[in-house]
Image (spheres, rainbow, N blue to C red):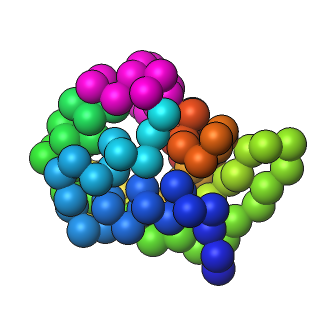
Amino acid sequence: MILPSPIQAYIDADQQGDGPAPVAAFAPDAIVKDEGRFHVGREAIDAWWHAAKARYQHRIEPLGMTGAGGLTEILAKVTGRFPGSPVTMVFAFRVEQGRIARLEINP
């Protein structure tokens, strides 16, 4: 499966656990919604990503992709240190000008 470049960069960096790389895929004013909370801007997204990685030690494995209306949804298996692992989740990305403008993560 061929993912849009910024989404692939985010997933690659997340899988490698690479500290600054995941946030580099986001626009400066990007928004992430995860677990009912919003994280706005690269600094907040960086803090969210590091906290989630430390807490859950998760890994994302893309299983499929759909796209329509500027939204790319990735169905992914997420494994880590949390009840029910592994779980299947939907990562809904909006990419604008070559950067992730919005990411919403849903079960």
Depth order, front residue of 36/85: 36
Say which of 83 and 69 sits in front.
69
Q: Give percent across and percent down for residue 58.
A: 28, 58
Q: Is residue 95 left or right of residue 36?
A: right
Magenta residue check for 29: yes
Quarter occupied by the N terminus:
bottom right
Residue found at x 64% / y 41%: 97
Q: What residue is rendered at 53% in x and 70% in y?
A: 62
Question: Which range is magenta?
Answer: 28-44
Residue 1 visible to an observer of this rendering: yes
- Image quarter of residue 85: bottom left
Question: Does residue 49 show up magenta in the picture?
Answer: no
Q: Main secondary structure of the magenta part?
A: strand
Q: Please state which of residues 25 and 48 is positioned toward the viewer in this rendering.
A: 25
Residue drawn at x 57%, y 33% as measured from the top left: 102
Instruction: Give the answer, above or below, for where 86 lies relative to 39.
Output: below
